[in-house]
Amino acid sequence: MGELITFWITAPISVGAAALMLFQRNAVHAALLLILNQFTLAVFFVLLDAEFLAAVQVIVYAGAIMVLFLFVIMFLGVDRRETLRERLRGQRPLAIVLGVFMVVAIVFVVQVGVGLTRRATTEIPQPDGNVQEVARVLFTDYVFPFEVTSILLIIAAIAAITLARRSDRLVEEDESEVSP
Amino acid sequence: MRTPIAWYLVLSGVLFSIGTVGVLVRRNALVIFMAIELQLNAVNLTLIAFARQLGQVDGQVLAFFSMVVAAAEVVVGLAIIVSIFRRRASASVDDLSLLKG
């Protein structure tokens, strides 16, 4: 019963924060609403017996990634309002109609595929707790993908350094502008 | 009493659709990127809900990998946005129409 109550309190907050995010003209407000949405998702992860991922969600998403977003927003100074002028006429109404159609389609697929009232009958066997069980599967069955992600992270770090670094030509141009 | 799995799937579908509409409607590159994060989160919720339904922890491991990829993607994406902003002093995707036919 407690799970049902928690779900029905958290779900409207989650959808509300996500929907409000679309209407924020200030990028900082949008980022803060996305953080709220990610906290509610962590609540759902706890309800679904994924305590480890709930902690990762708060630490990595709501913590690290969103701080990075806010840092870039402040760094670029793009927290000013964006124009509402449409380049492609009718793009916004069409996008909203397609979004509503997508929700209807997903509900239909869930109804056909899973059934709207079926409950899980089996428990996840995790006698020592969720963290131990995730670690056991991660370091036995999925140890090769786990190692591959380390390569991915190194590539991402190198790419970020290469992209964010100013090229020598640009630096020289700036210096010549400063000293007349 | 457990919550029906379909509620989580429908919630995840609604969040994913909101993210999709956000990508299509907004013009600020950073907000579009946040909407993509919302979509990734919605898919993670689906993975974890199915892990619960099937009584296996594999779905949680897959969601964990998806979070790692999302972290790498955010770093590269933000670096691209910063380098575009440096060149054109704008974060609006409408200004990036140089390759228009």
Image (cartoon, rainbow, N blue to C red):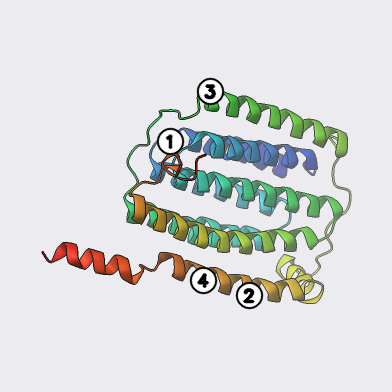
> Which residue occupies 63% across, 50% down?
B40
- The residue wearing badge 2 is A151
| Screen quadrant of the N terminus of chain B | top right
- Residue B79 visible to an observer of this rendering: yes
Q: Position of residue A114 (x, y in %)?
A: 86, 39
Q: Position of residue B21 (x, y in %)?
A: 58, 34
Instruction: Classify residue A3 by image quadrant.
Output: top right
- Residue A1 visible to an observer of this rendering: no
Q: Chain of mark 3?
A: A
Circle nearer the viewer, 4 or 1: 4
Seen in the image, is B14 located left or right of residue A168? right
Q: Chain of mark 1?
A: A
Front residue of this view, candidates A122 and B36: B36
- The residue wearing badge 1 is A24
First along the sequence among labels 4 and 1: 1
- The residue wearing badge 4 is A157
- Give yes or no for contact between labels 3 and 2 (Cβ–Cβ under 8 Å): no
Seen in the image, is B54 located left or right of residue B22? right
Q: Give me the disc on residue A90.
A: 3
Distance in Å between CA atoms under marks 3 and 4:
39 Å
Distance in Å between CA atoms under marks 4 and 1:
31 Å
Seen in the image, is B91 located left or right of residue B32? left
First along the sequence among labels 2 and 1: 1
> Which residue occupies 79% across, 44% down?
B2
- Give yes or no for contact between labels 4 and 2 (Cβ–Cβ under 8 Å): no
Distance in Å between CA atoms under marks 1 and 3:
20 Å
